[in-house]
Image: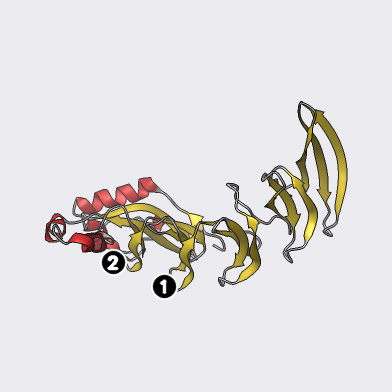
Amino acid sequence: MSQTEKVYNQEILERIQYNIKQGTSFLDAEIGLTQSIIPFLQDEHNRVEGVYGANHKVYLVYSKVAISSELESVKDAGIFQDLRLYGSSGKYKGVVDGSGKSLVPNIYYSITPFMNDIVKVENKNHKFGLIRLSGETILAPIYDRIDSLSELVFAVCKDGKLGFMNLKGEEEIPYIYEATSDEVVFYNGLAAVAKKNEDGKFIFGYINHKNETVLPFKFTNNTPFKNSNLIENWEEYKAGYGDSFTRERYYLAVDGTITHFDSEHIER
């Protein structure tokens, strides 16, 4: 599998857990678990939150419920109580492989597959980072948002600004664009990124991987060049008693050239 493939075959997983609780060691080969994961699944404090596959291996995202005796032992621990419970609370997630080996400790608020053996983690302060299941940290969890990987780069948001990085954690495009609520990805060599106009509103333009502006910053959304390579985007005008819009259509050719297809002006 070159891309991360979600398995999420919960019926199989539930059947495995049921059989183990009944005292049998039946493991379904379809999901790729081995006999050595049985102690992990037998532990009543381990709770499997999700299953996914990457690089022909299976991984389980899990949480760990705090043991009552542990809770009592730190009852009067003051400011250190949260530190002790951070890795044992059912709120936090970790990752084990199909044999039950711990790869990522359960200290993260959320963990989601990102690419092959890389997961996106979210800490208790709701900051995001990237970690390889080998233990290598690609990006420390200090970012406000990490968007999907596309064309070997991904958008990263920090302190209200957006830039692009690669899987080595290196900056490809600096943090000079506005971080909107939209996910930003490259399609066919172009990404729609935002700046603010004189009125403080977001306007979008299209850049390439060299951070060159291919289409000017004048559009009202971040519609990508996708599938048919034909996009419709909007340029907004203030006039009279209301707003008017011009819907612009562009076509992206295989050689990277862009042709203006047609325009339609709309009054409202």
Towards the viewer: 2 or 159: 159
Nearer the camera: disc 2 or disc 1: 1
Taking the spot 40% from the left edge, 61% from the top edge, the residue there is 59
* Amino acid at dot 2: Ser
**10 Å neighbourhood of mark 1: few (<14), some, or many (≥20)?**
few
Q: Residue at x 74, y 58 (%)?
A: 207
9 displayed left or right of 173: left
> What residue is disc 1 on?
135
Residue 7 seen in this snapshot? yes
Q: Quadrant of residue 254?
A: bottom right
**Disc 2 packing (10 Å; few <14; some 14–19; many ≥20):** few
Query: Where does the image place residue 22, in percent across and percent down from the top left?
Result: 19, 50
Q: Earlier in the sequence, mark 2 or mark 1?
A: 2
In the rendered image, the quadrant that contains the N terminus is bottom right
Q: Quadrant of residue 42?
A: bottom left
Measuring from the top left, give residue 62's x and y in whole percent.
Answer: 33, 56
Q: Quadrant of the C terminus?
A: top right
Report whether 105 appears left or right of 85: right
Left or right: residue 214 versus residue 68 is right
For the point 57% across and 47% down, the residue is 181
User: Which label sits on residue 232?
Assistant: none
* Helix, strand or loop under label 1: loop
Mark 2 element type:
helix
Q: Nearer the viewer, residue 127 or 243?
A: 243
Expressed as whole percent of the image width and height from the top left, the position of residue 201 reads: 67, 44
Q: Position of residue 174 (x, y in %)?
A: 65, 66
* Relative side of 234 to 5, left or right: right
* Location of mark 2 (residue): 36
